[in-house]
Image: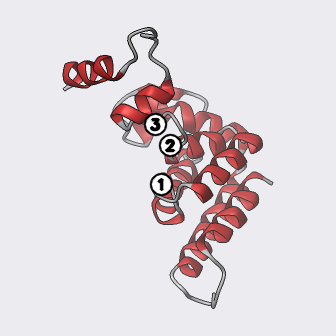
Amino acid sequence: RLVGELDKLLIALPENDKRVTPQVVEEQIGVSKDFNGFELRDAIVNRNVYKANQILKFFDKNPKAGNIYSSLPMMFNYFQNLMIAYYCPQKNNQEAVAKWLDLRNSWAAKDYMTGMRNYTGIKTMQIISKIREIDAKSKGLDNPNTPPEELMKELIFFILH
């Protein structure tokens, strides 16, 4: 498949300029290097307010790239596991946390180690509660007219501040 996509790309390039740029790849193949839900989660884990807001703005303009319905389960799963990580007897040991969370590799625990540095256990519980509240509101419960994009902004603001 990769060879086929590269052939398509080479045919589409002008004769006088054979440089492959991200724009050309996106136009010809359809793969975008723009933001996705995993990058939003990474920005949240690292408490990168600027990047999180950039991603939210991108999602507002490109709802197919990410929305509240795809982001909420991912964030809930992360913070749920983060709360469990706090109960690991050796929470300062990445391998022990990976085993405690049943992760396949110890490198997968890196985000949880970072999360434990950036969020307290109490804040983690508050975030889980807020995710549940926003999830209910996104489905219309106690929310007559707040659009999903605004609910997402409210959640991200709560998490990061």
From the image, state whether disc 1 or disc 2 is nearer to you. 2
> Circle 2 — which element?
helix
> Circle 1 — which element?
helix
Q: Is residue 117 left or right of residue 63?
A: right
Where is residue 104, by image quadrant? top left
List the residue tagged with mark 2: 38
Residue at 75%, 59% in the rendered image: 157
**Picture coordinates of residue 36, whole percent (x, y):** 51, 45
Residue 90 visible at all: no
Quarter of the figure with the N terminus: top left
User: Sequence-wise, which precedes: disc 3 or disc 2?
Assistant: 3
Towards the viewer: 102 or 159: 159
List the residue tagged with mark 1: 74
Query: Height in image: 80 above or below 86?
Result: below
Give yes or no for contact between labels 1 and 2 (Cβ–Cβ under 8 Å): yes
**Picture coordinates of residue 98, whole percent (x, y):** 44, 34
List the residue tagged with mark 3: 32
Query: Height in image: 68 above or below 120?
Result: below
Residue at 52%, 61% in the rendered image: 67
| Gap between marks 1 and 3 measured at Cα | 21 Å
Which residue type carries mark 1?
Answer: Met
**Picture coordinates of residue 91, whole percent (x, y):** 58, 36
Towards the viewer: 6 or 93: 6
Towards the viewer: 133 or 12: 12
Towards the viewer: 63 or 144: 63
| Gap between marks 3 and 2 measured at Cα | 14 Å
From the image, state whether disc 3 or disc 2 is nearer to you. 3
**Picture coordinates of residue 115, whole percent (x, y):** 64, 41
Which residue type carries mark 3?
Answer: Ser
Give yes or no for contact between labels 1 and 3 (Cβ–Cβ under 8 Å): no
